[in-house]
Amino acid sequence: MAEPKSITITVDGKSLSAPAGTLLIEACKAVGIEVPSFCYYPGLSLQAACRMCLVRIEKMPKLQTACTVQITDGMVVTSDSDEVRQARKSMIELLLGNHPLDCPVCDAGGECELQDMTFKYGAAESRYMEGKLHKEEQQWSPVVYFDRPRCILCYRCVRACGEGMDVWALGVQNRGSSSVIAPNQGDHLECEECGMCIDICPVGALTSGAYRYKTRPWEMKHVGTICTHCGDGCKTTLGMRRSDTGMDIVRGDNRDKSGINGDFLCIKGRYAFDYFDHKDRLRHPLIRRNGQLTQATWEEALEHVGKRLKEIRDTQGGQAIGVIGSNRTTNEENYLLQKFARTVLGTNNIDHHRTTDFAGFARAITGKQNATATMRDVATASSILLIGNDPTEQHPLLAWNIRSNVRLNRAKLFIVNSRPIKLRRQAAAFLQVPEGRESKFVAFLNGDDTAAGSLTSPAVSNDSLKQVRDQLRGAQDPIIIFGSELRGADIAALVKFGSGVRAMFICLGDYANSRGAADMGLYPDLFPGYVAADGPHNFNEEWGKVPQVKGMDIAGMMQAAKDRKLAALYVVGSNPVTDYSFDPAALQNAFVVVQELFLTETALLAEVVFPAASAYEKAGTFTNTCGDIQLLKKAGEISSVRSDFEIIVRVADRMGADTKKLVPFGKGVHADMGQSRGAQSGEADRHAVWLTANNLDPRLSPFDPMAILDEIQRLVPGYEFSRLNLIAGNDEHVTAAEHSNAGAGNGLVQIVPANDSLFTSGTLGRYSHTLNSVIENRRSTESKEVMAD
Amino acid sequence: MLHFSKQTIYTEHMSIIRDIAGIAKGMSVTFREMFAPTVVENYPDGPGPMKGAVFQERFRGLHVLQRDENGLEKCVACFLCAAACPSNCIYIEAAENTEENRISGAERYAEVYNIDYNRCIFCGYCVEACPTDAITHGHGFELATFNASNLVYRKEQLLAPIKPMRTEAPVESTSQLKEPAQDHP
């Protein structure tokens, strides 16, 4: 596509140039001239309803709306004159005609665009004598409240819900000044409860049920961190406020639009932080005494675990210990956990809840350049192939990016799925194939025409299959996205096809950091960066002796537990009893340690339970399912819980391990920085030399996740991103999968997709008040409707 | 040689007279004031709830949270007083009114309203900031305590009492009437 021609216009005497086709309001914004607007919103269709953006354009008889005028060569514009200011003031006066002056109680007060404009242009004193029309506030859903008199009819919510979310749950009733925003079900909403309408509302007409009347915007401290639910890694801004118990999260939103999610956040990112102060949250370590889990001190619990694990390791060896990691702990914690397992416990028996085959993906794309797409790429790619998964439910941001791309850039979307997923409405071609035959489609893509036989149905003809294949073969740099339906050899076959068209791939996994767990080597057969445990690697050199044989995966551990060969099981932030149907009876005789937020089915079987901090209460990094790494910022603190990082370091310390080896902290503080001994001595402190070379500080605390991040960046290929950019709050793409050295796979792997919906999120979702109330609300309205029928 | 001029005699004698006159004038004020009504406030032994203390109307004393004509709290927990406060001594927690539990006239009310008089400088900015005239300065001034934690006043201590309906004028102050509940050491 050729770059559009650049056009020069004059605004307020300043000359500026922008590409042809740019809207005047955007051209002004680009050079810092503010043109106010309510109804105009970048990325949504044009409305010209609020008439706040009126400007004087020379040779035009009347004032023009800058949001709908495209710039033309030689245009001369006045954006700020008495006339323009008077016009805007009059518009505000009309808007305020029926707008209640209840700013002191309105949730938007302090961050209200109408308030700002009134302060800027005046018209605060009304000349109307008539009383204002009052309507009672309505509750449309557990999270959406509507205050009709406050609405200024900018229609942003209607467009965000319809065009952006493709939900179309909000509409306009009546015409002219009697227009009202109305929900799709008469008096309530039936929608995805994303809360986009609330966030985008310039005034306080739509307010959030979760944040309602709790505090005021300026009372909160805003912390930009990463959502802890699905694998998309949206940036969410948490409003923090001091409270009796420390720092409370009052609300989540995306006021910081710099994240990979731009304007978007789904219900989980916006409201489902509320598990953090659930009454069932563990606040004390628990030790099993006389068959009962009883409250204990940290000292007792750590001492007990340290002593028992050391005993088991020394008497039965590391192979009698199993470790199950988490896909919602940080990269640093995952790395530390596997290092702890391999160097301190001396075992390769480490696994995590695998929701997709990241290892198979790494094996398939190893050695390829630019083979993985970022989340941002999805919003700009010219064509997208989606095989399996239902992004609307499981990866809402991905779905949003695909929809926006199709709507704004006319991208071509091809979908192969066994279910009629919602995204098919955006698809250029939707092929519904029988369940489990997605791999046949991959074979078909690779030229195996015989595979078409098992794919065709009344809805999918042989010709339509061929058509899609031809289009994909001719596609320009497409992005291929696939879910857990494709595994192992199927992924390899898909990559083989994709390489021919220079495709970039996204492998979809569930939970906030499942990609991170895979990259950091929570595998019995793979070290960090997908390095085969039994292949050539330098971890012996770096960490000291590590076990050379492959360990057991979760299924293996369960079998070993049944055979009474598993003496201890160390579980971090995972619930294998439920997720993997791990037989509880098999764990009767094993020493089970669990680090968790809640008393899960697995924690109930444990001998010791450590209360862990949630991702809102610690710092670190998360890698999303595309491989975009982002900084997790500590927002609040809950008393008497500790981060998984700290717990692991403390347990290692109680086992007598050298924590300085586990977490490379304090380097160069007591000794030199490695320069004097240098590489020549052969005994160089590689880590300290690397720190010096990278201008990084020696970390002073054994609980500093950055100390481990230093080591990750040094040892995991593909993680050489810009730390500066990461700390600035931006996303960086990591390519551990492309640099992997995983050797041959061992065929069958047990993949258990989470199959979460928009309103569920594994263990954490079960304890979210908002998610539960939405589910409950849906159930009750459904039963009411059934009764009405 | 003794020689007294007329002038010398005059000045010597007149000075005595002037002094006597001066003292008499001064004493006249004294004697007049002795019989005039006293202007010294008889605090704390005076009569009435103020114990003899008299204030200008503008005096900024202990705050009073006012009620409206229906007896509902005027405060709607907008946090503007807390935002205006230069010493950051106001702490509020907001909550929503319900049909069953109506505390204020608007949708929201202050569930917790604390003023920390350790920090308060009685500048009156909170009163100026209040959009509903809910917070006012009363004339309460007896804030001294042996325990600094007593100086964090809760909403219950600051609220005006519910007055009978016929009262039109705003309540001036309540806390001046009685000592705040204190735990004496």
Image (spheres, coloured by chain):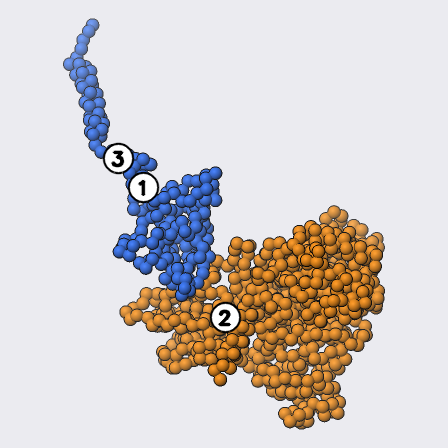
Chain colours: A orange, B blue
Please tell me whether residue A378 is drawn above or below residue A698 in the rendered image. below
Q: Which residue is mark 3?
A: B39
Percent coordinates x, y for residue B26 in the rendering: 22, 26
Please tell me whether residue A47 is drawn above or below residue A459 in the rendered image. above
Single out the residue that lies furthest toward the left.
B6
Label 1 close to label 2 by CB (< 8 Å) = no
Residue A510 falls in image quadrant? bottom right
How far apart in space, not on screen, are marks 2 and 3 (Cα)?
65 Å
Q: Are marks 1 and 2 on the same chain?
A: no
Percent coordinates x, y for residue A763 in the rendering: 63, 67
Percent coordinates x, y for residue A775 in the rendering: 55, 73
Say which residue appears at 49% left-offset and 81% top-offset.
A787
A605 or A13, nearer to the observer: A605
Say which residue appears at 17% left-offset and 12% top-offset.
B5
Q: Which residue is mark 1?
A: B50
Single out the residue that lies furthest toward the top.
B1
Please tell me whether residue A516 is drawn above or below residue A755 in the rendered image. above
Say left or right for B166 vs A666: left
Say left or right for A666 vs B128: right
Secondary element at tag 3 = loop
Q: Which residue is mark 2?
A: A143
Say which residue appears at 66% left-offset and 92% top-offset.
A457
Secondary element at tag 2 = loop
